[in-house]
Image (tube, rainbow, N blue to C red):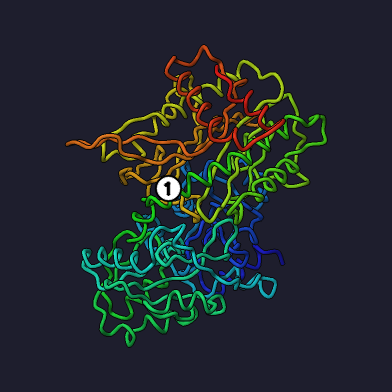
Amino acid sequence: MNHLDHLRKLMKEHDVQGYLIPHADEFQCEYTAPYAERLRFLTGFTGSAGIAVVGETQAAFFTDGRYTLQAKEELDTQSYDTFHISVTKPQDWVKENIEGTLGYDPWLFTPNQLKSYEEKAIPLKPINGNLVDQIWGEDQPNRPIDPCFIQSIDFAGESHIDRAKKVGEKISENGAQKALITNPDSLCWLLNIRGDDVVYTPLVLGYALLDADGTYDVFVDLEKVNSQVYAHLSPQGRIIDLKNIDDHLNSTQLKEVKSVQVDPNSIPIALEQMLKDANVELISKPDPCQLPKAIKNATELEGMKQSHIRDGLALVKFFAWLSQQPLEGETTEWTASLKINALRSENLHFYDLSFESISGYGPHGAVIHYKVTPDSALPIGRDSLYLIDSGGQYFDGTTDVTRTLCFGQPTAEQKDRYTRVLKGHIALASAKFPKGTTGSQLDILARNSLWQAGLDYDHGTGHGVGSFLSVHEGPQGISKASNTIPLEPGMILSNEPGYYKEKDYGIRIESLVFVKEISKGKKPFYEFETLTLVPLANNLIDKELLTTEEINWMNDYHQQVFKALAPKLVGVERQWLETATAKI
């Protein structure tokens, strides 16, 4: 019996006519531990965003613009219809194609995630015990138990005791006695701990019940807690085994607690139900750690600056190495990705990659989140464009950078498209904006030049970035989608417009920037300062499309890159940098 047939058999036993399988774990992590890769197990999809809906005779898969091409390649299209999630919503497909009740795992969905189904009057049924897990059986990987560790105050810039007290004050202002912290990145930031529970993001999977006075209960697998971490955490609270959270959140344990703040965007429905069963008033507010975590302190900003210098050196060494290769079939997307990963790993304070390096030549560059393997890798040549999107996790910062290169003679079209992407990148990087401005209001700056040519890209322009935490961090962002969070000094975002010609080539220019104040007065104004120090591709620029101000920005940026990196380079690598940062 194949997986779909087995799932449909279990659905029948639970009297549901449809079942939701998200790419999610009970912590709503972007990257999930192997045990939680249920969507991959069932469908074969390896991306980080998607959801499948299985009916009695039909099945559908939904993902965003980063993964639509990948989904068509990885899924069995005879079994699954694939859809762009912004064009066809899962709830609309369910309404049209499934008659009856839709089952779901209450640990994998938040209240807000199911609202759209409820609004369509779709009957929903929580099923305890994930149905995909039952199919997976003994082959399902174990949950991670690697030890967690302390993030030094030398990198955090603030003690976990002070952070807990400050966040506790916000909880009290919101009229709650406690807050249930369900985002692992918030947990790690709040308590200055890190872990190795998921790939590429140094997270400890767990929850915290934070009191308004700054004390807390931490729910983690006790096997991960060594004596140092115990000594770090125990003065301010209790450490409770994660498997006992249901006992702790019952009516007896919480009998003195009248109100708990929860974030409906991140709390699993299963935990919400436990609190309801304990007769606790739920105060729905955003995660109280989210905004202070996004606004980096001076120590975190300095760490990001230093980690970006080291990261820039790794990229320059990589590009210098590539420029020396014959590029006649021996260097592939795969071997190139191994090279940049190795160079980055030599850096001071390196911990891991911040995501799987995206190394795409020619048509693979047009797959926005292309996943290279030894079998899929194309040779890197001189006839098309090469896109490399990569980043590192350092104890003092997190990096994410994309550059597009051409080792031969670019076409007029490629130069036009690259220059338009560059114009958008410069427009955003050099923007000045008043306090209260959101990323959504700035998004058009990055797209305008492409729009004038009838072109666009199918992803956001910018995401928040953590400090030795998630490379994709909220609540701020820059995209067409509405975002009501104003940009504030200390926030770090990516600036990454792009252009993708399916089955031909892809272009993306991505640097990280942070928000800084440039004037106070009655109406404070802000601007971005670029953190990333990696040259852009001068040979892909159509200078006629650039204004004098844009040319000056390019030359100033390249001078900044050269000044920061050149003293640490010699020989071929310094020579490459001199050429790459030459004035245009």
Q: Tell me: 49 left or right of 186.
A: right
Q: Residues within 10 Å of mark 1 (few under 14, many from 20)?
A: many
Query: Which quadrant holds residue 431?
Result: top left
In the rendered image, is residue 247 in sight? yes
> In this orientation, does residue 104 appear?
no
Residue drawn where x is 67% and y is 37% of the image: 317
Residue 368, given in percent of the width and then of the height, sits at 59, 39
Q: Residue at 67% across / 25% down in the picture?
A: 406
When asked about the image quadrant of residue 527, the answer is top left
Q: Quadrant of the C terminus?
A: top right
Q: Nearer the viewer, residue 360 or 313?
A: 313
* Residue closest to the eye, 397 or 486: 397
- Residue 286 coordinates in the image, percent (x, y): 32, 59
- Name the image quarter holding the N terminus: bottom right
Q: Is residue 540 above or below residue 399?
A: above
Q: In the rendering, at what x and y percent does residue 334 appear?
A: 74, 43
Mark 1: secondary structure: helix
Residue ID for mark 1: 301
Q: Residue furthest front?
A: 567
Q: Amino acid at mark 1?
A: Leu
Q: How many marks?
A: 1
The spot of residue 380 in percent (x, y) is 74, 33
